[in-house]
Amino acid sequence: MGHGLCSVDTARLLERFRLSFSRENDNHRCVMDKLRTVEDCEAALRPVAAFASDHPDGEHIAPHRHARAQLIHTLGGVMTVTSPEGGWIVPPGRAVWMPPQCDHAIRIAGDVPMRTVFVREDARPSLPRQCEVMEVSPFLREAIVAATRIPLDYAAGGRDERVMDLILDEIEAAPRLHLHVPMPRDPRLARLCQKLIAEPARPVTLEELAREIHVSSRTLARMFHRELGLSFGDWLRRMRLLLSLPRLAAGASVLSVALEHGYDSPSAFAAMFRRTMGVSPKAYLEGRL
């Protein structure tokens, strides 16, 4: 008989873990925690702090930066995080890692309960140095939620510090996901990419785009590979796919989303989605990988 945990045992373990961190009702938090701000998290003496905030559908958080790195996680809805380097799509079950002093903006699709972990730059040398989307396991999710209830001045060597250390362990081990649309630095290519993002349903060929910037199709193909590390077709498919996630999160039908993003039918869109992501659009948004 195997020694691994069965699914029932795993579910019970996760539920016990969740309950162990939920015994203090939110109504019994100390006054400081009720009034906790992002600035408090940035100024905390301890290397890790967590912050809970709720954001309505359609909200736009203007470009900003933080002194600490952030793990930005959503319990529902979809976030689109953009920076000069590109855009990252963050549905439930995922989080984006944002390094310190990195300018970024956030768009909200669907109601988003955001849970953010702020990590001081010197917390661990092995933490990521670039923007990444990572998978959030049920275990990490519950630890993040628990961390929002931990006082900012938690005692060293105690249970609260061990929870924060566990979060850092899980961040290091979490699978990385390709939910990034890179943007070029070449101004000609950047203009083309911005046009395609603004009109994702537009039928285009490499030859047509090349004529717009007065180069050959072969030259434009090389520009995509050099600037973005992707072929034109791969970049276009990824861009359309990732742009579709906020629309799906907002409740749009697969038919509408397919037509809005250049697909002739919902079945063609769903097939591309499943081929790329490994699951259906609905299963992906529900975090069922």
Image: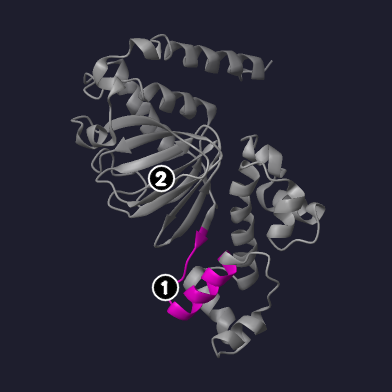
- Residue type at the position of mark 2: Trp
Q: Position of residue 226 (x, y in %)?
A: 49, 75
As drawn, is 68 to the left or to the right of 14? left
Q: Quadrant of the N terminus?
A: top right
Residue 189 appears at what percent x and percent y?
Answer: 50, 77
Task: Residue 220 in the image: state x and y as whole percent.
Answer: 57, 82
Compare residues 132 and 195 and report the one nearer the observer: 195
Which quadrant holds the C terminus?
top right
**Which residue, given by chain and number where applicable, does mark 1 sit on?**
185
Q: What residue do we see at 50% from left, 69% from top?
A: 228
Q: Is residue 21 magenta?
A: no
Spatial distance from mark 2 to mark 1, Cα to Cα? 22 Å
Q: Is residue 228 left or right of residue 242?
A: left
**With respect to residue 26, does 35 lie above or below?**
below
Q: Quadrant of residue 170?
A: top left
Name the mark on residue 53.
none
Q: Which mark is first along the chain, 1 or 2?
A: 2
Q: Is residue 23 placed above or below 134 in the rendered structure?
A: above
Q: Which mark is residue 97?
A: 2
Q: Residue at x 37, y 53 (%)?
A: 104
Magenta region, mostly helix, strand or loop?
A: helix
SS for tag 1? Answer: loop
Residue located at (53% from left, 35% from top): 111
Residue range in magenta is: 181-197
Asked which quadrant contains residue 163, the reply is: top left
Q: Are marks 2 and 1 in contact (CB under 8 Å)?
A: no
Image position of 197 (left or right of 37): right
Determine the secondary structure under disc 2: strand
* Structure colour scheme: one colour
